[in-house]
Image (cartoon, helix red, strand yellow):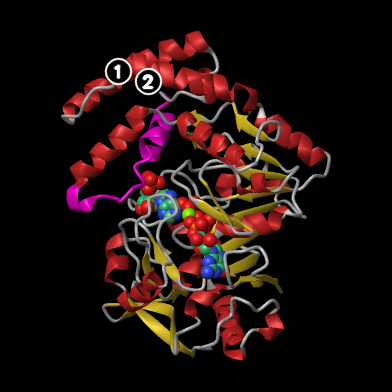
């Protein structure tokens, strides 16, 4: 397989984990390059459900190597728990999971500050996952972050942590929050450091050598295009570059090594957390929630739902350079008589065919919809494109045309065998 970056083309939770799992078959190395344990990627292997947060979903395929790249922010305690959880389910990570020594750490003061800032924001809160992601990337940019390479050097870690806890306790006090105990944090993170030491490596060199051997690399994007710190609905975004460019900076693999970008999108739209969602619609949300669908994989929060927004996905195709599209959760629309697709926005007499940068403008935009007849047939047992109802194929072809990238994969259920290639 060509070196492939897979990104979310909407607001996260598009089904990236499932599609990564399917594509892993043909890859040698699967790489996470941004985000942290704010991600929740669901994969079903048979009846067994796995939710991956930091470990690349490729780990579920025996023999594949997985990398947590330099651009990821790693909560060591959470990573140890995840590796142990996988081990208990018979998935061995040791020897095939490689953790970048230059990835930054998420520490307890990051989580605490994340929560405190959300409280302070009140009604303007972002609705973060409270995993400390924003403060950890903030420290990275401010050049006061601790990295994996520090975690595995006991004296250095102790000195740096002591200093950072002292400073952050001052900040926490100003918030009226409880200060952290250095001794307690130090003991827990040292233990995690000892556990993780065998996984730590120079992943830039590792990936370079994989490229030289002609192996194929699959980049597992986290979050989605509209949660990107630069291209998303700022400030209602996460703190990393979730778009395709982030895969290179977050792994050290240069851009000329990338052959293909796959964009994953649902056949409708969802978002978890605050911020604009132009096509949000209570009717479709109620229908999906009643089916037991669209509850967050990381926080369990009900996801906000809406119609497919082609203004947004067209923008995603542009900023990511999407070649191929994977459309998931097609079966979620099986019961509908009529399906709407947003084809433009209207704001004060002006029509927008592109995604406005100004949040205030975006919040005022009223979607212009095209209507498509539903297929009213269960699709989850259908195995080939040709057997999908004609109305379903027409709907998916319209999404392809409106988004402007090739429809390559159609998914009608969470399992591996509920996937069609076009
Ligand atoms: P990710 O963060 O992009 O990996 O997506 P999540 O795992 O957070 O959310 C996607 C949800 O949709 C998960 O529960 C998947 O098991 C499920 N899923 C993925 N593709 C399909 C599909 O085609 N049909 C159905 N019914 N569920 C799907
Ligand atoms: P995956 O990889 C959906 C959202 C949060 C919040 C905003 C900022 O599973 O698609 P953060 O904790 O990152 O500071 O929160 O981003 N968010 C996600 N939404 N899927 C995700 O990951 C997300 N990761 C963060 O809900 O709105
Ligand atoms: Mg998710």
Distance in Å between CA atoms under marks 2 and 1: 6 Å
Q: Which mark is residue 185?
A: 2
**In the foreground, 103 or 98:** 98
Is 266 contained in the magenta span?
Answer: no
Residue 130: where, in percent of width, then height? 34, 42
Is 133 contained in the magenta span?
Answer: yes
Q: What residue range appears in magenta?
A: 122-143
**In the foreground, 298 or 119:** 298
Name the element at disc 1.
loop
Q: Which residue is drawn at the image coordinates 21% and 26% (left, top)? A: 178
| Corner quadrant of residue 210 | top right
Q: Which residue is drawn at the image coordinates 54% and 39% (left, top)? A: 85
Residue 287: where, in percent of width, then height? 38, 76
Q: Quadrant of the C terminus?
A: bottom right
On the image, numbered disc 1 is attached to which residue? Answer: 181
Tell me, yes or no, whether the two marked residues, 2 and 1, touch with CB atoms within 8 Å.
yes
Rendered view: 419 above or below 321: below
Ligand 2 closer than 8 Å to the CB at disc 2?
no
């Amino acid at each position: 397989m060509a070196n492939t970056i897979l990104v979310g083309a909407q607001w996260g939770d598009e089904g990236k984990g499932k599609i990564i799992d399917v594509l892993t078959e043909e890859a040698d190395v699967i790489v996470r390059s941004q985000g942290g344990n704010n991600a929740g990627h669901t994969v079903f292997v048979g009846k067994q459900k796995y939710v991956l947060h930091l470990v690349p979903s490729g780990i579920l395929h025996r023999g594949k190597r997985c990398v947590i790249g330099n651009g990821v922010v790693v909560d060591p305690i959470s990573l140890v728990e995840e590796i142990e959880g996988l081990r208990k389910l018979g998935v061995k990570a040791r020897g095939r999971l490689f953790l970048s020594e230059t990835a930054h750490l998420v520490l307890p003061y990051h989580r605490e500050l994340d929560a405190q800032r959300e409280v302070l924001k009140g009604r303007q809160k972002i609705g973060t996952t409270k995993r400390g992601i924003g403060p950890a990337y903030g420290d990275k940019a401010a050049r006061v972050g601790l990295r994996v390479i520090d975690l595995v050097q006991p004296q250095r870690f102790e000195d740096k942590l002591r200093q950072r806890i002292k400073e952050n306790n001052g900040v926490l006090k100003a918030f009226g929050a409880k200060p952290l105990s250095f001794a307690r944090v130090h003991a827990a993170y040292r233990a995690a450091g000892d556990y993780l030491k065998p996984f730590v490596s120079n992943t830039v060199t590792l990936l370079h050598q994989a490229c030289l051997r002609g192996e194929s690399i699959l980049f597992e994007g986290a979050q989605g295009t509209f949660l990107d710190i630069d291209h998303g609905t700022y400030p209602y975004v996460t703190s990393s570059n979730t778009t395709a460019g982030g895969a290179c900076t977050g792994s050290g693999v240069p851009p000329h090594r990338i052959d293909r970008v796959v964009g994953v999108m649902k056949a409708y739209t969802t978002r978890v957390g605050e911020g604009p969602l132009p096509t949000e619609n209570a009717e479709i949300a109620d229908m999906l929630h009643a089916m037991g669908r669209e509850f967050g994989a990381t926080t369990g929060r009900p996801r906000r739902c809406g119609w497919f927004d082609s203004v947004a996905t067209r923008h995603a195709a542009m900023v990511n350079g999407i070649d191929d599209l994977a459309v998931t959760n097609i079966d979620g629309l099986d019961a509908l008589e009529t399906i709407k697709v947003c084809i433009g926005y209207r704001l004060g007499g002006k029509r927008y065919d592109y995604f406005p940068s100004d949040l205030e403008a975006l919040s005022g935009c009223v979607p212009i919809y095209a209507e498509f007849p539903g297929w009213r047939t269960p699709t989850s047992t259908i195995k080939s494109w040709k057997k999908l109802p004609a109305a379903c194929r027409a709907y998916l072809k319209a999404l392809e045309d409106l988004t402007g990238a090739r429809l390559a994969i159609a998914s009608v259920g969470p399992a591996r065998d509920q996937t069609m290639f076009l």
